[in-house]
């Protein structure tokens, strides 16, 4: 029972920190408005680690690789801690375990990205009906514009209702099935 509580705390703390790093990465990549409460919050809670990492890990064009790498490392640390608390012994197959945990962390980053897009699409759709001028609207628009734009080119609004969010959500669900299968296959290494 104590191990379950520790796993819960580890999952919550490192999972949320990894999410914050990933959100910061995507907000910089998609050039989301800097002057909004969400951006300021993410910068405030991740700057202590991102600033020193930027001195060591360079950016590549518009990609802030240090933030992305830190999100991945947080996932690796989370998965390692969870497996250790569940009683997995790394000493016999350390190379295989490191490779498996690294791949699992990458799959978790992909899965988290899909969930971020899904949440942004849903929240933006709801806000467009009730409060389209919310301070969160420009941030959500910067997150969803690249994805929704693909579908908006081919699917016109029907009766002034944009159906592209529906198609994006269906595609994301299908991608989550694929990612879940990859996760199960990698987990068989343990």
Image (spheres, rainbow, N blue to C red):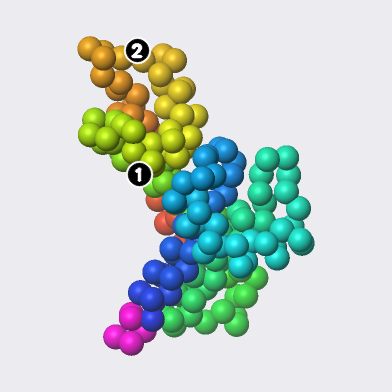
Q: Nearer the viewer, residue 59 or 128?
A: 128
The answer to if 181 sits in the magenta stretch is no
Neighbour tally class for label 1: few under 14, some 14-19, many 20 plus, Cα within 10 Å: some
What residue is shown at x 37% (from left), y 31% (from top)?
A: 168
**Callout 2 secondary element:** loop
Horizontal and vertical percent for residue 59? 73, 48
Q: Nearer the viewer, residue 110 or 189?
A: 110
Q: Is residue 87 visible?
A: yes
Q: Nearer the viewer, residue 42 or 62?
A: 42
Q: Which residue is mark 2?
A: 156
What residue is shown at x 44% (from left), y 35% (from top)?
A: 138
Horizontal and vertical percent for residue 64? 66, 49
The residue segment tinted magenta is: 1-5
As displayed, is residue 57 above or below residue 34? below
Dominant SS in magenta: helix
**Callout 1 secondary element:** helix
Say which mark, if any, is on residue 119: 1
């Amino acid at each position: 029972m104590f191990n379950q509580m520790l796993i819960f705390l580890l999952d919550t703390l490192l999972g949320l920190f990894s999410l914050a790093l990933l959100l910061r990465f995507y907000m910089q990549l998609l050039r989301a408005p800097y002057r909004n409460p969400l951006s300021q919050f993410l910068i405030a809670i991740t700057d202590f680690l991102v600033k020193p990492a930027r001195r060591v890990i360079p950016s590549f064009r518009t990609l802030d690789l240090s933030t992305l790498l830190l999100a991945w490392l947080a996932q690796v640390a989370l998965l390692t801690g969870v497996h250790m608390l569940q009683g997995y012994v790394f000493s016999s197959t350390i190379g295989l375990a490191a490779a498996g945990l690294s791949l699992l962390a990458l799959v978790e980053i992909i899965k988290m990205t899909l969930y971020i897009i899904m949440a942004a699409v849903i929240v933006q759709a709801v806000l467009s009906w009730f409060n389209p001028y919310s301070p969160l609207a420009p941030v959500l628009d910067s997150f969803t514009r690249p994805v929704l734009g693909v579908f908006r080119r081919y699917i016109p609004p029907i009766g002034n209702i944009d159906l592209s969010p529906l198609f994006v959500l269906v595609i994301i669900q299908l991608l989550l099935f694929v990612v879940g299968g990859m996760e199960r296959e990698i987990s068989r290494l343990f």
